[in-house]
Structures are given as structure tokens and as C-alpha cells.
Image: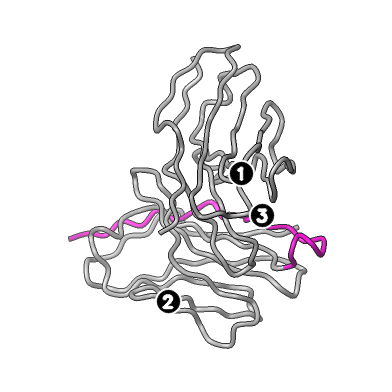
Amino acid sequence: AQKITQTQPGMFVQEKEAVTLDCTYDTSDPSYGLFWYKQPSSGEMIFLIYQGSYDQQNATEGRYSLNFQKARKSANLVISASQLGDSAMYFCAMREATPLTQGGSEKLVFGKGTKLTVNP
Amino acid sequence: DVKVTQSSRYLVKRTGEKVFLECVQDMDHENMFWYRQDPGLGLRLIYFSYDVKMKEKGDIPEGYSVSREKKERFSLILESASTNQTSMYLCASSPGYSNQPQHFGDGTRLSIL
């Protein structure tokens, strides 16, 4: 079964500094996708960044980058130049990439999240 | 932009009531999902659907049912609400491509008294 582990229940960072949020995963599927979501206190889940298991380069989206180490089964999120608005819960999630038509599933498995607090 | 709309942000119901949570997406996505989120437990999948009138059980389907009569709408039904169903409910949709994210609604905070 697929599993996502986020070992940091809470993290603190000073404004304008970089922070790394850890995510490790476990799967026997050779093809899978990894996602990071942000959830502010208002509750909505906001998609941040995606990494495919066969992608050769680490994904980047603005101030977000993903440090993907396939052999270690880790997909850590790096936020550069933290802002006060980055304070939120962050969730790592995994989905197997085999399509439904080939017996796969579109389900996402989520980690339990990391609460990030950015201090001024 | 993808828009997933949940009918209520906050809802209060009584035990034994039949409760409907509605979700509508405007991007013609094939897949739709219902999750519940509880402190310390993260997000857990209740049901999902990959086509009209199709549904699949997720990890915690007990006490819930779903309906998908139209592609854009996915309803979650609590047949007889109980206090342990007090939770945050999140609806999501996605197209049928593995590298595309699920897009979430704003969530419904449901309290069962």
C-alpha cells in the first residue's frame, strides 16, 4: 500500500529565509506522481507543485521547488524567501500513475501535514 | 481557472438527519472525490467517481453514500448523521491524466449535534 510520511508536525522560519518541509513515501509502483498542497487557516486546499516519478529534473514553481531523491523515496518541498502569507498547513500527497482504464487508481494518499509558521 | 464549488462553508445538523453535501465543478473533469479531514488524521478518502453514475469506495465509506447524476455534480449523503461524522469535508475534481492535480473546493465544516 502507498504511504506518505511527513515527520515535522510544525516548523518555524523567519521571514525572507528558506525552509524545507520533509516528505518521504513508500510505494511498489514504478510510476507515480507526487503533489504538494497548501492549506491556509481558511480551509481551502491549494495545489503548489507536482513531480512525476520519471521526471529527470526537480520541479519548480516560482518560490517553490521540489527536492526529489528517488532512491531515498523523498520529495521535500523547499520554499525560498518565506513570506508571512506562507503560514499554513502543507500536505504532501502521492498518486499512482497507472490509468483507471489499466486497473490503476486516481486516488491521492496524503501525509498528515506540517504546520509552517513564518515569523516577522 | 478551475472552480470547485461546495454548497456550504458551515453546516449544523442533528443526529439522525439525512444530510446532503453538494459539489459542482466547472472544468468538465472526469474524476471527482470526497474527503474528510480530521485533526491528527489528515485527509481520508470517502468515495470517488470517475464517470457519471459510477462510484468507487474510498478508505472510509461507512455511513456515507454518493450520487453522480451529472458530470459536473458529485453529492455526498449522510444517510443518518451521527456525531462522529462531525468533520471538515472536502470535494475535489481532476481530469483523467496522471500528472494533473486534484482541485479542491473551499470545504464544508459540518457539525452534527
Q: Quadrant of residue A51?
A: bottom right
Q: Residues within 10 Å of mark 2 (few under 14, many from 20)?
A: many
SS for dot 1: strand
Q: Secondary structure at mark 2?
A: strand
Q: Residue at x 37, y 59 (%)?
A: A11
Q: Position of residue A35 (x, y in %)?
A: 53, 65
Instruction: For marks 2 and 3, give the CA distance.
Output: 23 Å
Q: Say yes or no: labels 2 and 3 on the same chain.
A: yes
**Looking at the image, which residue sits at the far right?**
A103
Residue at 72% x, 40% y: name it. Answer: B53
Chain where mark 2 sits: A
Q: In the drawing, does residue B42 fall left or right of residue A10?
A: right
Please say if B68 is above or below A26: above
- Amino acid identity at mark 2: Ser
Residue named by callout 1:
B44
Tell which of A111 and B29 is nearer to you: B29
Q: Amino acid at mark 1?
A: Arg
- Residues rendered magenta in the picture: A98-120
SS for callout 3: loop
Please name the colour scheme applied to the rendered image. Answer: one colour
Between disc 3 and disc 1, the foreground one is: 3
Residue with the mark numbered 2: A65
Q: CA distance from mark 3 to mark 1?
A: 10 Å
Q: Which residue is mark 3?
A: A107
Q: Is residue A119 magenta?
A: yes
Which picture quadrant has residue B29? bottom right
Crowding at dot 3, Cα within 10 Å, few <14 / some 14-19 / many 20+, comes out as some
